[in-house]
Image (cartoon, rainbow, N blue to C red):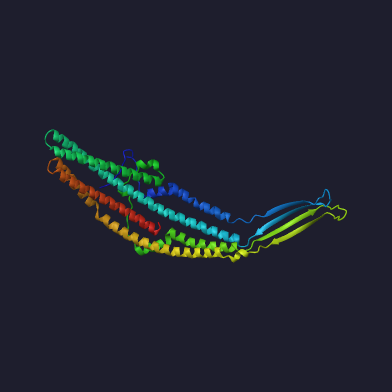
Amino acid sequence: MALTCLSTTAVSASPLSIDSCLNAVMHLNISLAAERLNIPIARAEERAAKVFNDPSLSFEYANNDDHRMQMGQSYSVELGYTWSPGKRGARKDLANSERELAEALLDDYIRQLRLDAATAYHEAVKAGELYAVAKLISSAMADIARGDSLGLAIGEVREVDAMASGVNARMAAADAASASTEYNNSRIALATMMGRLDDARTLQFDESALRAYPDIDEHTAITEALERRADLRAALKNIEVAKMQVKVDRAERKMDFDLSLGYNYNTEVRNEIAPAPRFSGMTVGVAIPLKFSNSNKGAITAARLRQEQATLEYEQAEAEVRAQVMSAIDAYRNARAIYNSLDNSLIKTSQTIYDSYLSAYRHGDVSLVELMEVSDNYSQVITARAEARYNLGIAYATLLAAIGH
């Protein structure tokens, strides 16, 4: 059964393929746009780590009771600078590693977002299929109920049969309304991810737009996953960040040297007891801190343990990637086998049987109970096919995500 899910306001809209859907998500998704800002933020922090210590400039004025004792006045200016050997380079290396980690995390976010978008797409396709068959059956049951009502009026249909067909028509209408709600909700969810909420009620899908499902070798998939998975790159970068943090903590334990260069000018001392001419002088100084705090190595120990922890987390992440790919391939192969077993010939056969019984009922050759049984079977086949298509689409998207696409 070809699927064409159309709303009354979207008859002319073109079908949406999964590739077009994913492309829209990559360009218009608001959460992704916010997540992408982490990269320029990390680059800005990387530039900030390159900054040098600021020099200091100080001025000093002294009045040695010059008005009363005539001991003169003095003026001085001093330029100071704190030299921190090794610290700036360590901070630069850490900021660079954190920027690369942010890039890896963004790639992993995109990988997961593509999987979520593919899931939403296939949910909308499935909901559209179920709505189409529910609407078809509801329309057929409504026609039967109207025909039986007319038959009752002219005495050709029993009252109990007319009542039963009326009840079935109302139940089918309720099922169609429920399916319509599910379909609209799934389209709204998908359109939100695509950044096209205004188009939610005009989205339509065609089964010809669905991608092919090729066979995938397990060994090749695992090898590719270990090379491509962004979360593995992020776990590896976590080790590097932890290593750079150890380097920074070591650098922070190094001594800072305060260098200073000063000039001072003293006016003439006119005191009769201790006169002195005016003079100027230069000062050069260096201050060396006494790093008694270096005896506490808690920060270094913690940094080393975080590095060891990051290494173990990477090994665990690698094992999980292997397991995810193996499970995803098994699920994909099973889903593809089930989907292929529910081929188009089964759908056509079920529809032919349903149409035959529907025509036979209208001619009085079969009972309403028999027609409803065939109708239920037809609905179950369509539902099974839609579920199989959905499960295959999700299994394939999950496998691609596990590989790192």
Q: Position of residue 90 (x, y in %)?
A: 57, 61
Residue drawn at 37 percent across, 57 percent down = 400
Residue drawn at 40 percent across, 54 percent down = 112
Task: Specify whether 48 is left or right of 173.
Answer: right
Task: Specify whether 172 is left or right of 54.
Answer: left
Name the quadrant of the C terminus: bottom left
| Residue extending farthest top | 153
Comparing 300 with 292, the one in front is 292
Q: Position of residue 92 (x, y in %)?
A: 57, 59
Task: Specify whether residue 280 is in view.
Answer: yes
Q: Position of residue 131 (x, y in %)?
A: 28, 44
Q: Is residue 332 above or below residue 34?
A: below
How many discs mark residues in the rendered view? Answer: 0
Task: Specify whether 66 is left or right of 147.
Answer: right
Task: Specify whether residue 224 is in view.
Answer: no
Comparing 276 with 115, the one in front is 276
Residue drawn at 77 percent across, 55 percent down = 264
Task: Specify whether 74 is left or right of 90.
Answer: right
| Residue extending farthest right | 272
Quarter residue 330 falls in:
bottom left
Q: Position of residue 347 (x, y in %)?
A: 23, 50
Q: Is residue 64 above or below residue 364?
A: below
Quarter residue 221 falls in:
bottom left
